[in-house]
Amino acid sequence: MKLDFSPEDELFREEIASWLAANLCGKFDSIRGRGGPGDQHMFIDERKAWEQKLYQGGWTCIGWAPEYGGRGATIEQQVIFNEEYARAQGPGRAGHIGETLVGPTLIAFGDQEQKDRYLPEILRGEAFWCQGYSEPGAGSDLANVKTSAKFDDTNQQWQINGQKVWTSLARESDYCFVIARTDSKSVGHRGLGFFLVPIDQPGVTVRPIEQLTGTSEFNEVFFDDAHCSIDDIVGEPGDGWKVAMGLLGFERGVSTLGQQMLFQNELDEIIVLAKANGSAQNPQIRQRIAEAHIGLRIMRFNSMRVLSSKETDGSLQKEAMIYKLYWSSWHRNLGKLAMDVMGSESEVLEDGPYQLNRLQSMYLFSRADTIYGGTNQIQRNLIAERALGMPKEPRG
Amino acid sequence: MNFKFTDEQMMIRDIAEAFLAQTSTSAAVRQAMSTELGYDLQLWRRICDEMCWQGMHIPEAYGGLGLGYVELVATLEQMGRYLCCSPFYASVCLAANALLVAGTEDQKLTYLPQIAVGKTATLAYTGESGGWDSNSVKVTYQKQGDSYRLNGSYRFVPDGHSAEILVLAARDQDTQGDEGISLFVVPANTPGIRREWLPTMDQTRRQGQLQLDDLVLNSDAVMGDVGQSWAQLEQILDLGRIAVAAEQLGGSQQCLDSTVAYISERVQFGRSIASYQSVKHKCADMMVKVEASRSAVYYAACVGDQFFNQTSDAVGLAEAASIAKAYSSEGFFHNAGVGIQLHGGVGITSEYDIQLYFKRAKSTETFLGAADYHRERLATLLLDTQVAL
Ligand SMILES: Cc1cc2nc3c(=O)[nH]c(=O)nc-3n(C[C@H](O)[C@H](O)[C@H](O)COP(=O)(O)OP(=O)(O)OC[C@H]3O[C@@H](n4cnc5c(N)ncnc54)[C@H](O)[C@@H]3O)c2cc1C
């Protein structure tokens, strides 16, 4: 067990740091530190252009194998990349769903043709993706999806009908990956398929949902005879659950490291503010800032542990299951801390009618962290059942 | 970077687990608890002679095995898990560390080989104030020619009533804070030292109090530079904090495991109580505490290694130690408390072991500074100083 990075890794660190210093400037100055959680729909054009800039430098999808255009970066290098990216205040990655969810899923479960078609445009920062899992009747109980996919023999394509909800960044995306029922008589995990659906088509309607922040990052997505090609199902009809769950496994992997660096920037901002407005003298605030620091450091150590022990087949061990519950609770507390450090000023907006500053918007949006991607209650069920071997919840 | 045990470290951990599962049973712990010494001499001999744990991180030049802090922490975790009653912590994690950090070459050559073969030792520094910072050093020394005259009393000294070698912190009269502190190492039977057992709520580890009445020491007992030893003492304490946090981690894990085992057997309302969601969620939260504590402790162990081979500075050590100690203290206490609750009535009996963990959680939480102490220490680094963490 050791923490030191090798000399080669330190060279890698210099390489990315100097590339960022030379490129994250000029027209990209305005997006430094922007586009994080709660702010993901902002500066979308600039951030997409930034993805292409990253690609030109060879800095997109660095964890993918070279045969798919990545660098085959080691875990250590991915840690370093994320550290340096955040240190340079790199903007929230517009391409992160493609890079960290869709890409690894296609690499693991897709066929050659799908890899050839979709991976290059993700790599180049040209195609953006959103996640079509949740439905009005299928939130925590994801297996209850009703959206249907029927194979249309005449047109040799899949026809999709139904509704998704809470779909983040659907308006900013080119494709949506959708789980839908291929066997209309099936219930639960069986009879599902995993589809790659273009958004820009007559059968797809995206309606923004206004959030408590006054902005709209998530949407309702309606499918009325929407279609995708015969080749756009990942795996076989009936494999949808397996693929969908595989994807959620990648979500708990390296993609968490970038997020922690955004958290670090937020905590740093809170510390600067506390020093400036005198709340750094308040003993309770001091305790809470230290607690936030402890929590974030441990979050990083958790990731390092989990990533170092990744089984050779790429699956994570059961200890990795605490990750979502841990970070979401931590971040929710950070939101409250930010407001308490701001004190009375926390109520006052940047501007009317409802222009929140970064910390205010983080505070409000952090309430979503314990809901999306499996609520805290669902996480606790999973930990108890899968990691601790306790009895399963009864089903209605 | 490779943040997992090597195969060899895994083996050391597994051997410790297997040995302690056999020797530090509930009955053995209770037997040790009932004696004033606080541990079973036979078990201690086996730990020293068969397992050689007490020489684990002592360099080979001083009679040890020359392994690292990670190996030590892996062993301590298991000792905490099995509530192993022994003078190991005081001898190795306090006294041997003190010698390694602050001892002169002569002192290392004299004392470390003794500890490596099983002589017991401890460190005394705080007293009636009950504090853990530099101001809590109240015993004074007066320099008289080539010798030092020490007066005052210590409390909360692990195995203070029985250890054979003592490391003592004292301050030059009329100084305060970080100034004027010196460390001394002496055989415990030196005239001028009175010692007694301090009965404690947690009976799985003994504490003693020491009274020094005109203890006269020669300059060869002085460790480090006279009057300048606080910085080194702080490093010694940080290494001790990492070690205690490792024990807490083991205890915390055991609270979870024994609770899950108990509730899986117990049936109420016609079903296993482990099937109730409020019970499951409490266990999930316990697991979060265990795993987060594990990450903090293993990280700190690596920093301990870096400290010994001089790739980490004192600030890095302090940060890692305070993180591990603050989190593991609260995590262990939480898990022991929830453990009692989920045991129901039997959790309140002396027969079940969960109460022993509950008491151990509290005593280790207080020892070397509770969570609030360590958070304030981190807050000082984060808010009042310019160091980069
Ligand atoms: C900001 C945001 C972005 C999102 N983005 C996306 C996206 O891009 N794509 C997508 O597919 N989805 C997305 N979601 C949806 C998200 O995954 C769901 O909101 C989440 O799974 C919870 O489902 P629900 O909202 O229907 O709540 P419900 O399932 O109705 O839960 C309501 C409450 O009941 C509790 N509960 C439910 N079942 C149980 C149980 N078995 N045991 C104990 N308690 C239970 C929950 O914990 C919760 O507190 C997003 C959500 C948010 C808030």
Image: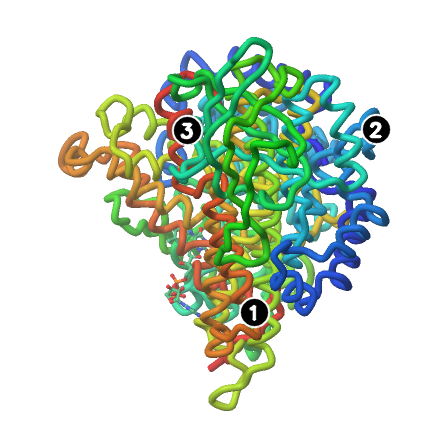
On screen, A157 above or below B161? below
| Nearest-to-viewer mark from 2 and 1 | 2
* Total marks placed: 3
Residue A273 in the image, given as x and y percentages of width and height: 28, 26
- In the rendered image, which quarter contains the N terminus of chain A? top right
Q: Subunit of mark 2?
A: B
Q: Residue furthest top?
A: B145
- Kindly identify the residue that appears in the image at 58 percent across and 68 percent down: B353
Q: Are marks 2 and 1 in contact (CB under 8 Å)?
A: no
Residue type (three-letter) at the residue carrying disc 1: Thr
Q: Chain of mark 3?
A: A
Q: Secondary structure at mark 1?
A: helix
Judging by the rendered image, the residue that carries numbered circle 1 is B259
What residue would you read off at disc 2?
Answer: B60
**Viewer-proximal residue, A287 or A392?**
A287
A319 to B266, vertically: above or below:
above
